[in-house]
Amino acid sequence: MEAATVVRDLHFGESPCAGPDGALYVSDFYAREVLRIDPSTWRARPCLSVPGQPSGMGWLPDGRMLVVSMRDRRLLRREPDGSVVTHADLGEVTTGAANDMWVDAAGRAWVGDFGFDFYGLLERDPGSDPLFGPGTDPPTASITRVDTDGTVTTVADGLRFPNGTTQLSDGTLAVAETVGGCLTAFTPDADGGLTDRRIWADLSASGVDGGRLLPDGIAGDGEDRIWVSDPTAGGAVLVEAGGRVRETVRTSQPCFAVGMLASGAVVCCTAATSSPTIAAVRRTGRIEVAA
């Protein structure tokens, strides 16, 4: 499938997801805001300012929005009156920036972090590539569970840049390990721990062009398969357990996140580059959709 561009002029879109109101919500990292997009018109409007840089989002069972604030490592909550409060402080349990997130049906948030000071390294050497540059070997990182009362608990560590996260029908929590080139699965237990860690999909030959896929954002398709963004080749692939590709979406430029609407449309967040030194000053970000 070929995706069509429906929204232009973002800095860097991430974490696309359908809200309880049926709208599409997207974090624009370097505009420091969350966008609400009407899927009937594709009109995008800012709905929340996040000075600390927004990333993953989700909703509590009562409809209140949760949003990761990356740079100050907080999980924010928007109240019914529109005010924004700190749902949880992640500073003591995360390293580097907080990142993507999944909020489950019980309202528990599962948050990944970078594992190292990515932005600090770039500030000191703007031309470097702290993730994939020559000789780089970034430290591993963790998954933090945030309960509905704001309690934070580290539930997994040793992940190679945990990124997009989703959940399957049997409760399996799947996490994209970007540097690891795989989707890793866990089984949540009754107490909220993560057990039975295993490779759910080896993506060494699952890319849009058949090469290695370094996954960024992911999204379940409702049938226990997972859409995985392919930042290298430009597009997204639908994979089943093991990594076999069942469907492919091609985009006009690199794809860094993927989501799904209730209509079944596949939503891709694309940009010319993920480099903050470029994306923060140029608006190459797009929303591309395949139906």
Image (cartoon, rainbow, N blue to C red):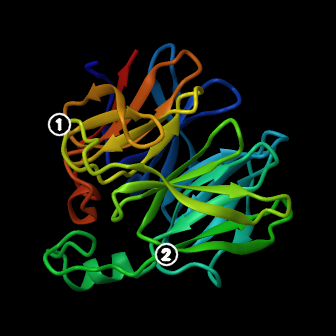
Q: Give the crowd class for mark 2: few <14, some 14-19, many >=20 residues within 10 Å.
A: many
Image quadrant where one finds the N terminus: top left
Residue 141, which numbered label?
Answer: 2
For the residues labelled 1 and 2, say whether their Cβ atoms are less than 8 Å apart: no
The x, y position of residue 136, in whole percent, is 22, 79
For residue 34, which numbered disc appears in the image? Answer: none
x, y percent for residue 256:
34, 46
**Mark 2, secondary structure of its residue:** strand
| Separation (CA) of disc 1 from disc 2 | 29 Å
Q: Is residue 272 left or right of residue 77?
A: left
Residue type at tag 1: Asp
The quarter of the picture where residue 248 lies is: top left
Against 239, residue 257 (above or below) is: below
Please report the residue visible at 71 percent of the width from the left and 40 percent of the height from the top: 170
Q: Quadrant of the C terminus?
A: top left
Relative image position of residue 166 (x, y in whole percent): 58, 45
Q: Amino acid at mark 2?
A: Ala
The residue under the point 20% across, 59% down is: 278
Instruction: Tell which circle, 1 or 2, labels the residue nearer the N-terminal end.
Output: 2
Disc 1 is placed on an element classified as: loop
Residue at the (29%, 82%) spot, across then down? 121
> Which residue matches tag 1?
209
Q: Is residue 268 above or below residue 193?
A: above
